[in-house]
Structure formats: structure tokens, C-alpha cells
Amino acid sequence: MKRLVAAALLALGAAPAPTVNTARLLAADAAPRLADYGLFADAEGRVPAPGVTLYTLNTPLFSDYAEKFRYVWLPPGKPATYTATGVLEFPVGAVIVKTFAYPADFRAPDKDVRLVETRLLVRRASGWVPLSYVWNAAGTDAVLQRAGVRLPVQFIDARGAARALDYAVPNTNQCKQCHQQGTIATPIGPTAANMNDGAQLQRWAAAGRLTGLPDTLPRLARWDDAAEPVAARARAYLEVNCGHCHSRAGFASNSGLYLQADEPVPAHQGINKRPVAAGRGSGGRSFSIVPGQPDASILLHRMQSSEPGVMMPQFGRTVAHDEGVALVRAYIESLPN
């Protein structure tokens, strides 16, 4: 997978003739098959079509340990525009593509990779439209799935342990809830800060895919880079995994818990903050984050849970993210009490 990412990024500056069916993407009715859009050059969804660009994030959303391939399609002559906060401004006709996949063995991530789902966010004149396409068992076709479905997945994890889970493809309403900002839907991952790896945005600008790029850029930490401060890593993780709902314009805006990495108010970060209406989700705890006491903190309790109505995030995962939990635990332990 890493070799595929590197090869695609090296090809970023190329501008071959587009083959993507933009008219079909903008049609009112969703195509029944992913292949109808021409976003991939092969039937198996492994090779992006000319002009469909692979991109990477410093800190990704956790989705039951799935590997993800992220792409963006921009209509010819219509670049994205830099924004200092929030996602980049994408033009009408743009498509953000995310394919979820599982290697048979995560210790050999480039071998025997099963694609399970490809999600699209299509930028139409009316706003962003989410669409989910589920791959068949042979990995030769992906069909539209609006109602959501559970898919059994088995793999060997990075530590050599056998794992089995029911991967959850979300229904359309769940997609809209997670992507809601105010009264509109919006992408989550492709912010300038989260795409800022020191070179990626500059390549986009050089290729004419991005305008307005300043010399000084915000940057979100890599959650898994031990060389970076634990607080920066944990807050980046919380922003990506929780901040789309826990923001002033998100679905959980009335909670008063705002988990963006640049939130300046300690109480809004959750520190010594009582919940508005956690109910049984609090696990008998009184504060979202108790400095120095992770096991007394509601936030960590809900991250560790896999129980519906308790776990957070409530969509997008069925198991706890052990490594993410460990990071947030270390962050809470580091806070002065």
C-alpha cells in the first residue's frame, strides 16, 4: 500500500485527458455501480483514472482498523481553494473518494488486500452528497448501498493476532449526521492542516490543483508519531475522530464539548467539564476529562466502550481503537491536576 501511495503521489503533476464521467456524477440519481463514474481505470478499483489524485492525511479517522485509499477528482480547470480552517473549498463537480480495505495480514499490508467499501462525497451545486458502494466477494464490482449493511471481516493484525469483526457500512442518514456542519454536509479529513506534510499541498499548488496557498500553513500532528508531543498527537486524534460532531457547528454542538485541536478554552476541551446529558454513557463518572485520572474521565470511558448508546464515536466503528485509547490515556495522565 505504501508503494502504491508513493507511486500515485509522484504522478500528481501529470495532466492526462480526463476519463471521469462528471455528468454522471452530477446527475440527480446515483449510479447503481461505482464503475459507472469512471473514477478507476480498472474494474477492481485499484488504479485511479487519469486525473484522480491520491492524497494522504497526517491523522486519519479510525474505522475498525481498515486501511484507506483516499483520492480526489477535480474537474479540469477547477482547482480547490485553500482555507486556513475547515476543509479546502472544492468546486462543483469535485469528488472525494475513500476506499476501505483489509489486508489478510497487516504485517504484509500490500498482499491479499480485500476492498470492502468505497465511499464518495460528490460536490454538487446543492452541496455535498454522500454515496456508499460495497464491493462483491470477488472484488470485481461495487454496487450502491443506501441502507447500510454489516460485512464479516477477518484478518491478522499488526501484532500477529487473528481478529474477526462485522464491518459496518453506514446508511445515508448516518453519513449525513457525521458530516453535518450547521445546516450543510461537508467532508471531514481534507483540511489544509491535516494534509500538511510539508510537500503535498505544495505539489497540488504546483500542479494547478490548489489556489491561494500561503507560505505559512497550519499543521495537525501525526497521531502515531512518538517524536511529537503527546498533547498535540492526542488533540489531533480527537479532532479527526470526534471533532466533526463535537464542534460549534457539528451534530453535538449543544454538548459544549468541542474537540478541535485549536480549541483554546479548557472546559470546552472537556477538562473538568460536566456533561450536558451523558446519561448512562457517563459510566457513573462526573467529568469529561479529569486531569491525571483517565479512568475517571467520561471521554476515555466512551472511547473504550463498544456498547451502542455508550461508545463514541457512535458510528464508523464496532470495536475500540486500542492504540487511540492508549494515546488519549497518556494525554489525560499528562494533564496537571
Image (spheres, rainbow, N blue to C red):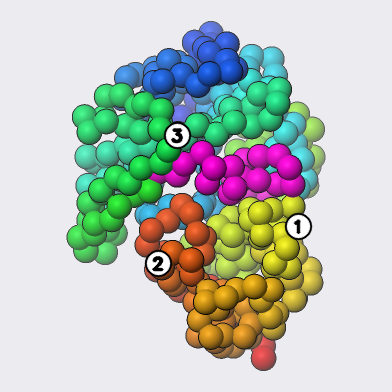
Q: Mark 2 = which residue? A: 306
Q: Mark 3 = which residue? A: 146
Q: Residues within 10 Å of mark 1 (few under 14, many from 20)?
A: some
Q: How many marks?
A: 3
Residue 45 position (above or below residue 312) = above
Picture quadrant where residue 134 is located? top left
Hey, what amino acid is under mark 3? Arg
Question: Circle 3 — which element?
Answer: loop
Q: Earlier in the sequence, mark 2 or mark 1?
A: 1
Q: Mark 1 = which residue? A: 248
Question: Circle 1 — which element?
Answer: loop
Can I make out residue 185 in this image? yes
Hey, what amino acid is under mark 2? Ser
The segment highlighted magenta reads 169-195
Hey, what amino acid is under mark 1? Arg
Residue 320 lies in the magenta stretch: no
Q: Earlier in the sequence, mark 2 or mark 3?
A: 3
**Marking on residue 83:** none
